[in-house]
Image: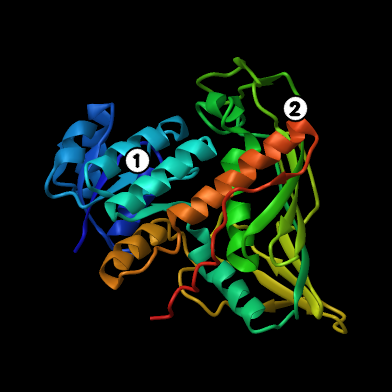
Amino acid sequence: MTRVGIIGAGAISGIYLKNAADVTPFDVVAVADLSEERARAQAAEYGVRHVLTPEELFAHPDVDVVLNLTIPAAHAAVSRAALEAGKHVYGEKPLALNREDGKALVQLAQERGLRLGSAPDTFLGAGLQTCRQLIDEGVIGKPLAATAFMLSHGVEAWHPNPDFFYQLGAGPMFDMGPYYLTALISLLGPVRTVTGQAVSGFEERTITTARRQGERIPVQTPTHVTALLGFESGVAASLTTSFDVWHANVPRIEIYGSEGTLSLPDPNTFGGPVRVRLAQEKEWREVPLSRPFAQNSRGLGLSDLIASVGENRAPRASGQLALHVLDAMQSTLESAESGQRVTLTTSAERPEPLALS
């Protein structure tokens, strides 16, 4: 079995380590973190053999794939170091904080003959794969348009250290946009153009969690971002991501076809519900999930990347797909700043549906 070394023993590492033993099997042989105490704690809880420094992990002969779970600001540097050490890489989203770094990673992986992949992998779950099947079977006819909404009032009410979410390179688009854009691209194909609007509703945010109750943090990035997306297929879509909305009553994602409408589940989850309403139908109907992985299956993209090495194919949650998502997000903010529509400089093929067996 291909052996995985994890860099970053923070909160997100727990679900990867849990699923590695069962839901999305892969062999974790080492864990590294800037905090040795944190790395040792995770290794002890999940039975990982080696606790290493990041440099030791890059060089370790037992590590074939590096799972990059560091903070977003470190994603590009850590992934580059792993690729330069001859390791395949799968990382948390986003691939990098700017398209130039993302392009460099994709190029380096290609030059070295290595696999590069990135979260999110929720589009491989039962909910969105069922949606993919319905679209491919023509159930709603030809897709014409789509809408998507991620509306919340931010993370300071529940996250113990929410500062990063309001710094440059974060905000709702870079934090949650990857889930929505990856879902849309996996279903509708690549994006050609974007037009963006972006504002910040609040100059400061007040932390309300117990340990840092009352602390105020500055807002340095747009917190309400809307993108008009022109897909290469001709589909027109809108995506709004926000940390400024107290309450809303909108769908997560809807795709409007020539024969009806498809209502998608939350793209930050792996399951349903999936609903359809065709042209002459009076009510929505829920469609049974036809694909596996309805539970929290984080790590599914990594498992598929590992399989792709032996099968001599691109991983479904590929670096190229993550780069295209990154390009769409950065282009949205650039369009909002310039007032001009932006044509993307990247593209990505729709990943093949996940095999049933």
**Which of the 4 quarters of the picture holds residue 256?**
bottom right
From the top left corner, tell me how far across and down residue 55 is, in percent: 20, 32
Q: Quadrant of the N terminus?
A: bottom left
Rendered residue at 40%/53% (across/down): 117
Disc 1 residue type (three-letter) = Ser
Q: Residues within 10 Å of mark 1 (few under 14, many from 20)?
A: many
Rendered residue at 53%/40% (across/down): 99
Does residue 198 appear anywhere in the picture? no
From the top left corner, tell me how far across and down residue 123 is, in percent: 53, 62
Q: Is residue 257 placed above or below 194 in the rendered structure? A: below
Residue with the mark numbered 1 = 79
From the top left corner, tell me how far across and down residue 101 is, in percent: 46, 37
Q: Report the side of 148 relative to 164 (left or right).
A: right
Q: Which mark is residue 200?
A: 2
Q: Report the side of 17 relative to 155 (left or right).
A: left
- Of residue 357 and residue 142, the one placed in the foreground of this image is 142
Q: How many marks?
A: 2
Q: Report the side of 236 relative to 322 (left or right).
A: right
Q: Residues within 10 Å of mark 2 (few under 14, many from 20)?
A: some
